[in-house]
Amino acid sequence: MIKKMELRHPLWLRLLHWSNMISIAMLCLTGFYIHAPGSFRLFASMDNARTAHFAFAMVLVFGVVIRIYLAIVKKDWTNIVFHPIEDTKKLPSMIKYYLFLAKDHPYYGKYNPGQKGMYTAVYIMALFQVLTGFILYKPEFFTSWAYFFGGYLVVRILHYIVTWIFLLMVLVHVYLDVAEGIPVLKSIVTGKIPADFHHGYHVDEKGRKIKAEKGVSA
Amino acid sequence: MATKLSRRDFMRAAAGSAVAVSLAGYLSPYIAEAAEAGELPPVIWLTGGACSGCAISLLNCQDPDIEDLLLKVISLRFQDNVMAAQGELAIKALYDTVEQYSGKFVLVVEGSIQVKENGIYCVIGEREGHEITMLEAVKDIGSQAAAIINVGTCSAYGGLPAADPNPSESRSVADVVKGKPIINVAGCPPHPDWIVGTIAHYLLFKDIPELDSAGRPKMFYGRIIHENCQRRQYFDNGIFAKTFGEMGCMLELGCKGPIAHCDSTTRLWNGGVNWCVQCGGVCIACTEPQFPNWPIYERMAEMPIGPATTATVDQIGFVLGGAALLGIGAHLAGNVATGRIGSSKDHEKEEGDN
């Protein structure tokens, strides 16, 4: 039996997802070594770790810039950007679902408000890391920027704190995708999700819940 | 046709380069020449909330030595530590100079300015029966100076007296005097070459040197300690000292070399003999505006997470990570218990029930 599939993630999105994932993973690993070379002994030398850190930083810079560009051009930003009013209204039903207080959740669009909030935060954090990273990369050039934040030590601590937030977010991100079902996990590799995958219920004019016909395009 | 370069212009250009590459000794003849021509503005040196370390550092200058410097190079009219005059005579000389050269002299400030209780925490002298506070003196004399040169991190950014909790409300000169060209010769203390070089640059060119965003002359503070550190190879090779006296990069011991702007690595101190890291001490980044508001012998500051409680970023991260893992475990158990994960998901038993 061949399941009817529909496209959830286009190719450009998948490519950028994995290139950004690899660069963020490498940046975290090299970053932790650069932060604590005595206790986080993963690399042979500081030179290796720093070279890799700077190289993957450039990959991430272009990844983020291209991702934001495509999000705008392909209208993908409507899926990702957290709307402070609309999405906050939707939050209670999502929290109820995650806390097992409701058995199902309404259809939110491609991503639920929690995901939207997280993905929006990831972009802001990535841009922040790029900015603070460059300040630390060329301290003799970005001096005034560093003093804007309160000095290099503050910049370094901020850079490190945001790294930790990235790690914690990845933990939640991966788990929630696994929890939604293996098809969701598969879709970021193959791009396709079963057409009958349940994305939440729709509400008709009389307020009755009806099952979503289609997941993505509805 | 090429622009005509007079001998004098050429000498000035050469002297400017000489300042930058620490050949200040070669300058004295030209400055002496300028002094004889009567175009050298006098220098007034005021000391506020300071330890006199910057003045002592200046006394260590070798090229030119302090004798040449004081007698031939600069016309120093007031300096608490080295002047012969005392008491009212000294203060009179100070204000006479200010009056006579108003708008022309160079004011050098050493030490921070105490502003609490109208500056009563730092009195530098007495005039006609009332105390002159540092605050009053800097405001009064600073507003009449052609330029202000801050010698030391205290006068430049507040430094040690302005560190938390700052009971005397110490401030930098820039916080007290507005609208004057200010050059910050930061350091605790600054290298004598930086002081002499900056003063000589101003006297020769009648203009402030190129400054960075923290107001420091770029010719001395343009590079990072870490770039040319003698222990840099240890850093690149990942060899880190665990205790003092060990070989290796001292980053883990709290060295602030990667964030400190100055040229101590190549200029060397005490007449080119040695410098902080070479003799086994960590760099404390004394030339930075935030000095000394950081842990000197630790790499990173701890985070104040509550009243009288601190933790490292790693500790906070591990606790949050543990909490996230616990939450995930609990949620996973809930998912299995309610049948969201497992065979029931595929059959969608609950469909339509809710």
Image (cartoon, coloured by chain):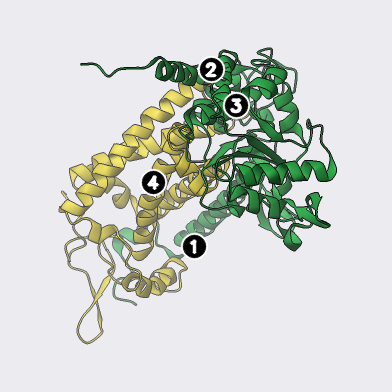
Chain colours: A yellow, B green
B282 or A216: nearer the viewer? B282
Mark 1 or 4, which is nearer the eye? 4
Q: Are marks 3 and 4 on the same chain?
A: no
Q: Amino acid at mark 3?
A: Trp
Rendered view: B213 above or below A211: above
Q: Which mark is residue A126?
A: 4
Chain for mark 2?
Answer: B
In front: mark 3 or mark 2?
2
Disc 2 residue type (three-letter) = Tyr
Q: Mark 3 or mark 1: which comes first in sequence?
A: 3
Q: Earlier in the sequence, mark 3 or mark 2?
A: 2
> Quadrant of residue B115 in the image?
bottom right
* In the foreground, A6 or A83: A83
Which residue is more in the foreground, B232 or A56? B232
Which-is-in-front pick, marks 3 and 1? 3
Give the labeled residue for mark 2: B30
Please report contact status of discs 3 and 1: CB closer than 8 Å, yes or no: no
Q: Residue at x 22, y 48 (%)?
A: A69
Left or right of residue B225: residue A21: left
In the rendered image, is residue A33 in sight? no
Query: Would residue B80 be found to the left or right of residue B72 on screen?
Result: right
Q: Position of residue B169 (x, y in %)?
A: 71, 56
* Contact, mark 2 vs mark 1 (Cβ under 8 Å): no
Q: Residue at x 64, y 53 (%)?
A: B140
Q: Amino acid at mark 4?
A: Ala
Q: What residue is at 44 percent from the left and 32 percent from the top?
A: A138
